[in-house]
Amino acid sequence: MGDAVLTQFFSGFSLVAILIIAALGLAVIFGVAGVINMAHGEFIMVGAYVASVVQSGLGGNTFWSIPICFVAVGLLGLVVERTVIRGLYDRPLETLLATWGVSLILIVVIKMIFGTELHYVGSPEMLQGGFPAPGNLPFPWYRLFLILLSILLLIATFVLFFRTKFGLAVRAVRRNRSMSEAMGINTARVDMLIFAYGSGLAGVAGAVLAPIKTVSPTMGFPYAVDSFMVLVLGGVGNLMGVPVGAAIIGEGETILAFLFNSVIGKLLVFLLIVLVIRIVPRGIFGYQERTLGHRR
Amino acid sequence: MTTASAELGRARFTLRREPMFPLWSIFGVAAVVAILATYPLYGTEYVMNLLGMFVCFSIFALSISLIWGFAGILSLGQAIYFGMGAYFIALSLKLSYAAENPTRYGGTIPDYMEWNGLTEVPAIMAPLMHIEVAIVCLLFFPTLLAFIFGVITFKRHIYGVYCAVITLAEALILQEFIIEYQAYTGGFNGITDYETYNNMYFLWVILAVAVLLFGTSRLLTHSRIGTVLKSVRDNDVRAEFNGYEVANYRIFVFCFASMMAAIAGGLYAAWMGIVSHLDTGPILSIEGVIWAAVGGRATVIGPFIGTFLVKGAEFFLSQQLAWAWQLVMGLLFIFVVKFMPEGIMGTIGKSIAMGRQRRAYAESQDAYQSGPMAVVARLRAAFTDGNRGFMDNLLGRSGRRD
Amino acid sequence: MKINRRRFLKTAALTGTAAAFPYFYTQKFAKAEESDEIKVGILHSLSGTIAIIERSLHNAELMAIEEINAAGGVMGGKKLVPVVEDPQSVVRVFRQKAKKLLLQDKVVAVLGCYTSASRQSVLPEFENNNGILLYPTLYEAQECSYNCFYTGAVPNQQLDDFAPWVIDKFGPRHYLIGANYIYPKETNREWKALLDNFGGETVAEEYAPLGHTEFATNINKIASLQPDVVFSTLVGDQIVAFYKQFKQFGITAEDIPICTPITTEQEIKGMGPEYALGHYTSFNYFQSVDSPENADFVSRYKATYGEDEVTNAVMEAAYFQTYFLAQALDKTGSTDADALITEGLPGQEFQAPQGKVKIDEKNHHTYLWARIGQAREDGQFDIVWKSEDWIRPDPWVDLLYPDRDCDFTDPRVIERIKSGDRDRSGTIEI
């Protein structure tokens, strides 16, 4: 029994990692640009399809598809930003509808290219199998890879935001858009690049999640749902919210699922989320805006 | 035009006094209601079924436009209340149907309860068997829930994007609960196979309720409360500084809209004969937002037009263009958001108002410049043009003070 | 605003035109259809989550209709015309599209639905309007509607032989995992009854929320409980996620085999064959069935829809049920629903890819063959066991409902349906 609990704890970490990878792109876009990207799940889906093309068409594995997906979906995000989102930044609620439209279009386009059936993406040769971990199951290499990758992505994003000049601009825009504009920051460019970066992260999520889950045109929505939960629980506007929200949901769900069952585990976590967002509506790491101007 | 002045222009436009029920609107509503109400006499049952559903969805979209277009609260969980209403009625009809007609398992309780191992209707649900109880529940509980949520949210100044995301999460969670507690809710399969009210008389009921709610909404939005709500939407801080308890207005309209959504849900359940978890989820909520946005969210008639247009197009296109109808829908949403942010009716209303304003202005200019009628025209403008001050009109000044 | 005459006339004219529009519109619709065509409804989701599987059923039915038409049509040269609708994986839309097919298009029958949820949502419509639904999916049974013909397997055709075979081969301790809805719950109830009967035991029974694709916890429990067999009734993309994660956590088919009545070639293609390798599925049809009809069917399907495509059991049922309909139309020579239901369809036989199949004369279900397949490296199944004869369908399984049966030839049932009772099921107590 003790062994099983240990294994459970570890596998909980891998779920946390999956949630972080899926939610990070959404959090970045929402946190900085203030855009609720309803097409986030579909960006992940596109990433997964790109990964399947990389695998079947170019013969590359997941390591190849990570950068390719990042660039490809990042470019897609760039295009979407330039054509759809641009000009809607002062109407954040409407971006939600526009990106919902984008998600419908992406599903149809992918369906027309690849068909409706499930696609197959394998994991790389060297990450197959597992290593003996404390507990009663070997721990899959691939899940360890996911955990490392999630940490890596978090660090990369932190470095980008807090150690680069661009990051300074991003934070300035986040705090006070018109003031940073007055200081000479090209806010439109910041928005565009952040949208592309967030989309690229979604692409990476698609690339690495495809080997453990399914690839189909409708695979995106559940990921978008999970990401939203992480976001509302952890708090929007602060990157720390993502790992914390993911940790609470991921570990909570796995531990409760082990103690009771998956159904009850999921429901208890959901109840917790409702309670938290009703008590701290901006999430655990929510950022209280200090503006007294026009609130939306 | 910068945002601020556009904002101001909009505020000015919406604050313009209009008659509560202009003649054309009474005519128009009467004509549409007459067409819909008599449709079953010459139309097909299938289209009648669709029309009834569209009206139910229109009421739902109207509830969204009330809180979004008139009070600036975007809820992506409005289907929570729609779904609650639908489930109350569906449960009630199912319970009474099962009691009279033995199910395929031979019992007298709903079939989904039987295959989930229940042997009798849970005591807490038993009273729902009476439709009166269900109707009272439908009116009471969604409103209560909206009140609780509203107090927690609006008293703490949470709205805008946060409100949208939170309500979205709540809709998702309710949906999960319904799927998991299948012994009580029918789960993934939903509730179906009960006495359905799918006939001309019930269509009249739906239409009557729609007209009633339409009229009430029009009254509400064109009354003092409506004016305050619009000011809250356009600049809540200023409204607060002017001494209005902003949160209370928001809570009130939120509760009212939720009750409206629940009523729409109840009618829908009785009309369609099927209710499922999808009727409480975020996708229906978002669809409702889209209907309101396409039609014109800051108008009362807009949601009806938007729903009929989008839903109608969906049903038409999914037959004619099965592979691409979602593509067309996606493009439509982007188009509306980008180029018609006020929606169809909003855009029409705006251009009419602007034309009127321009005409009045031109008239006053002409009059000012050309001789003896000048004084009369200016006097007339002074009493009729509410957009400029009395003295401005009288003296022919532009009257812009911003 | 004052009412002057011009304004009044204008409004009235507009109103009149608008009011008349729907009339003309429906007139256009009401035109009588060509008499040498017979409309058949096809109701499978082409968009939404279930489209993954329903698309293939849709394809198989269209292919069958084409073949039938190419071979001279039905009822002496009339063509079958498919009316395709997309119910978008939403039960509400299923219901409406069914209504449309029945009332507007006046189709002779509808081939459609995949999930139990969608079937249950449309059945009231078929019963109220006396339509015919041909339903190709394996399902939990315990149902028989006058207006529905079930050409997929019922539990007694998939499980009755599977359970003793599994217990005999791998051992008695079973771990049951399923999606949290009606089909898995009912199938597990039956499986537990079979385990009781043949000396097996259930070590745990767990359900995952629909759409839940994270199974580390369940796999951990499996590892600590060490059952002999995992019996899975997960559905859709859950299947793919579960098999993948099962292997990734280092459990192979040699350690603990997954036995299931639902995993097809389609899902194996989606997960990659290495993940399904060695696991067992019980079905009436596999693509690897060795018969001339099947070789024909598979090659035609691939020629029509692409070499990469795989066939599966549900779609095979979708294929042959179209032939059932054509033969029934030939037999009765009319499109009358009651004639087709009472005379045409019952007893209809067809040499299907899986072998000879027949609609039972009494209960609207279908005689099918039982097979057990073991997944191979190439994503196909080795058929390791096959029933000696076709198996009679029993919607009310004897083990659970010994005193209940479904019989549309029973005088009580005939009486009930003739009397116009709302209850159109053929269930009787014996």
Image: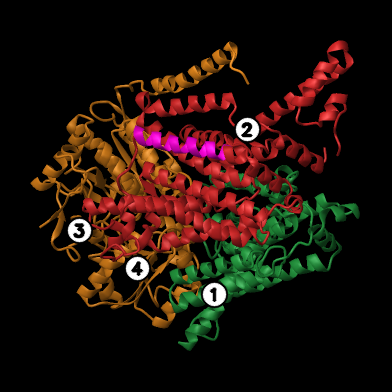
Chain colours: A green, B red, C orange
- Whether residue A295 can be seen here: yes
CB under 8 Å between discs 2 and 3: no
User: Looking at numbered disc 1 in the image, what kind of residue is underneath it?
Assistant: Gly
Indicate the position of residue C92 as horizontal and vertical percent values. Answer: 41, 45
Q: Which mark is residue C364?
A: none
Label 4 sits on residue: C259
Q: Are marks 4 and 1 on the same chain?
A: no
Q: Left or right: where does residue A130 sit relative to residue A94?
A: left
Q: Is residue C166 above or below residue B186?
A: below
Task: Find the magenta span and give its range.
Answer: B200-218
Residue at 23% of width from left, 47% of height from top?
Answer: C145
Judged from this view, the residue extending furthest toward the left is C411
Q: Are marks 2 and 1 on the same chain?
A: no
Label 3 sits on residue: C396
User: Looking at numbered disc 2 in the image, what kind of residue is underneath it?
Assistant: Ile
- Mark 3 surroundings within 10 Å by alpha-carbon count, few (fewer than 14), some (14 through 19), many (20 or more): many
Quadrant, the C terminus of chain C: bottom left
CB under 8 Å between discs 2 and 1: no
CA gap between label 4 and label 1 equals 30 Å
Label 1 sits on residue: A252
Q: Left or right: where does residue C336 sit relative to residue A43?
A: left
